[in-house]
Image (cartoon, rainbow, N blue to C red):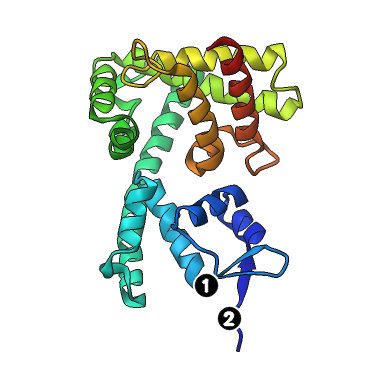
Amino acid sequence: MPTRDWSIQEIARLAGTTSRTLRHYDDIGLLSPTRIAHNGYRHYDETALVRLQRILLLRELGLGLPQIGEVLDSPASASTAREASALETHLALLREEQTRLARQIASVENTIAALRGGEELMAENMFDGFDHTRYREEVEQRWGKKAYADSDRWWRGMTDAERADWQQTVSDLGRDWIAAAESGIDPASAEAQDIARRHVGWLTGIPGTPAAVPGGDVKAYVLGLGEMYVADPRFGANYATSAGGTQGAEFVRDALRIYAEANL
């Protein structure tokens, strides 16, 4: 009996990613299609789906693509039983993440209740579940250990009020990007470019990033981040519109590109 497979468009939709990301995974040897149809479309079978699930899980855990390839292609991942065992490990980590998110939700709910009720905010409880260190490996891989050390020292040196202000800035940017993308305005419009200006200003204020290092290539950094917002579902989720997909992230990328080309 023939094994069922799925087209690249179906897999992209089901996995919440993009066809371009899947093609990139193929280009770097991370996830090859099971077959290519006569019309040139890539198709993936169940084995490929399991591999994609593991790729996305490992991305969520902060691993870079080269490290993911090493993990998946190691002898320890060669059998179905070992695949299942590896997924059990991922499941345990996901449950830890679920617990962390539950703490975050409770923390934010308590803050909302206090603000609406005119109660005093309990600063020691406002950041329960927030952990900036979980992306340490990825930051060090992308930009070096000094970049992480500088940003970590900056974050730990903040007061609770300063952290709250910073998180509010992030929240405001995300809200304004989504509203702009959903409004249908041009990424080159004055409104979109003003958000792009604020976004770049926010980036240059984070120590350790290429945007904050004197003499750093801010333009290349901004352009690279714009592409990553589209390619990486974790970042794209911050700009997801009601239409779903990568529409919001693509709008952010395009607006940042226009701003960078004109101003950086």
- 256 displayed left or right of 137: right
Amino acid under disc 2: Thr
- Where residue 144 appears, x then y in whole percent? 27, 30
Q: What is the number of the mark on residue 3?
A: 2
- Where residue 189 appears, x then y in whole percent? 72, 15
Mark 1: few/some/many CA within 10 Å (<14, 14-19, 20+): few
Q: Which of 191 and 223 lies nearest the eye of the viewer?
A: 223
- 249 displayed left or right of 57: right
- Where residue 83 appears, x then y in whole percent? 35, 70
What distance separates the C-alpha of mark 1 from that of mark 2?
A: 8 Å
Q: Residue at x 32, y 72 (%)?
A: 78
Q: Is residue 182 visible?
A: yes
Q: Residue at x 63, y 34 (%)?
A: 250
Q: Residue at x 56, y 53 (%)?
A: 23
- 56 displayed left or right of 263: left
- Where residue 10 appears, x then y in whole percent? 65, 60
How many numbered discs, if any? 2
Q: Is 197 drawn above or below residue 223 in the view shown?
A: above
- Mark 1 element type: helix
Q: Residue at x 56, y 17 (%)?
A: 260
- Mark 2 element type: loop
Amino acid under disc 1: Glu
Q: What is the number of the mark on residue 245?
A: none
Q: Which of 210 and 181 lies nearest the eye of the viewer?
A: 210
Mark 2: few/some/many CA within 10 Å (<14, 14-19, 20+): few
Which quadrant would the N terminus be assigned to in this image? Answer: bottom right
Proximity of marks 1 and 2: CB atoms separated by less than 8 Å: yes
Residue at the spot of label 1: 46
First in residue order: circle 1 vs circle 2: 2
Q: Which of 87 and 73 lies nearest the eye of the viewer?
A: 73
Q: Is 244 drawn above or below residue 152 in the view shown?
A: below
Image-quadrant location for residue 22: bottom right
